[in-house]
């Protein structure tokens, strides 16, 4: 059984750890609030842009000629963009995205994909697949997910669009964690390129009446909006993943704090019992000695 000195040392150590977990929880919570504000500020713009594009591309009289809408006959080369965090202490956030990325890579290989270009955003997922054989890794953007900015996102989007436009990739996919709530984050898979109308706008909204005054032409507007829409979509995904990371870390630090407090309560109870037992034994020794 541990001595009083050892238990007292463990109590002091847990108290110090609780100070760290509590501070990390507050920092992660503040970052999550900021990420939520960024998403809320950008979401109306993103939704409106996709709505306009969906209506324009849904017009049967408009012939769309864009390299970003070309559907390949066969998919042999795929670029897979996976988003994780660059730091740990965020529960299962990184392990979940790493596991799903591994599953997706296996699926692509089973489906006959000959070449996989892996684009990690976040150090953890980059480290997990750094020794993987059979595909190329682009590690140029692995730190861009720490503090997502529109300028950095535009650089990544340009790289991905050029891959598809130059036929270096037949399809580009995104793997990221969607933020639903503080306790729930869902690993999500979506197609980034090529663009399909169904991805932009649900059918019931495409059929709705619209009245746009367009200059100079629908084709020119679509040609101009598509790259912007792709950049905005990637930025929204990065913000979503970033919010999920901070939520996972806040929840993990809350659980660690709760577990630490429960353990501290048990140790305090054990310490008090052992201390009381030691005092009782000393009293019995004194009483026994005085009766001799």
Image (cartoon, grey):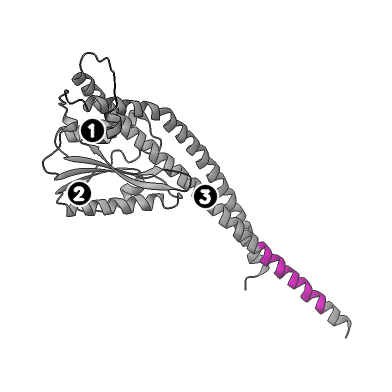
Query: Left or right: 270 with respect to 159?
Result: right
Give the residue at mark 2.
135
Give the overall secondary structure of the magenta segment: helix
Q: Is residue 271 magenta?
A: yes
Spatial CA distance of label 3 from label 1 is: 42 Å
Label 2: few (<14), some or many (≥20) within 10 Å?
Answer: few
Residue at the outermost bottom position: 292
Q: Which residues are magenta?
A: 268-285
Disc number for residue 197: 1
Near-viewer residue (9 or 180) = 180
Residue 289: percent from left, percent from top:
85, 81
Q: Residue 268, located in which quarter of the rendered image?
A: bottom right
SS label for mark 2: loop
Q: Earlier in the sequence, mark 2 or mark 1?
A: 2
Could you tell me which secondary element the residue under label 3 belongs to? helix
Rate crowding at label 3 as few (under 14), some (14 to 19) or many (20 or more) other CA atoms within 10 Å: many
Tag 1 secondary structure: helix
Q: Nearer the viewer, mark 2 or mark 1?
A: 1
Q: Which mark is residue 253?
A: 3
């Amino acid at each position: 059984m541990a001595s009083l000195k050892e238990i007292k040392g463990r109590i002091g150590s847990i108290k110090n750890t609780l100070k760290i977990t509590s501070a990390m929880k507050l920092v992660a919570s503040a970052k999550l609030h900021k990420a939520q504000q960024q998403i809320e500020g950008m979401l109306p713009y993103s939704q409106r842009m996709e709505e306009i594009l969906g209506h324009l591309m849904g017009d049967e009289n408009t012939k769309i000629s864009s390299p970003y809408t070309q559907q390949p006959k066969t998919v042999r080369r795929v670029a897979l963009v996976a988003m994780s965090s660059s730091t740990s202490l965020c529960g299962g956030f990184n392990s979940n995205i790493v596991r799903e990325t591994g599953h997706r890579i296996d699926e692509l290989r089973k489906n006959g994909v000959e070449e996989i270009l892996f684009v990690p955003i976040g150090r953890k997922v980059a480290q997990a697949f750094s020794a993987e054989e059979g595909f190329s890794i682009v590690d140029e953007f692995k730190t861009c997910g720490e503090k997502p900015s529109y300028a950095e996102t535009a650089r990544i989007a340009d790289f991905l669009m050029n891959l598809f436009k130059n036929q270096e990739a037949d399809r580009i996919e995104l793997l990221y964690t969607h933020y639903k709530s503080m306790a729930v984050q869902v690993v999500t898979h979506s197609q980034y390129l090529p663009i399909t109308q169904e991805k932009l706008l649900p059918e019931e909204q495409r059929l709705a009446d619209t009245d746009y005054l367009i200059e100079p032409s629908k084709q020119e507007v679509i040609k101009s909006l598509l790259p912007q829409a792709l950049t905005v979509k990637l930025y929204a995904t990065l913000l979503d993943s970033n919010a999920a990371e901070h939520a996972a870390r806040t929840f993990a630090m809350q659980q660690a704090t709760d577990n630490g407090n429960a353990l501290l309560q048990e140790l305090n109870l054990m310490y008090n019992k052992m201390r009381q037992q030691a005092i009782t034994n000393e009293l019995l020794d004194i009483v026994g000695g005085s009766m001799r």
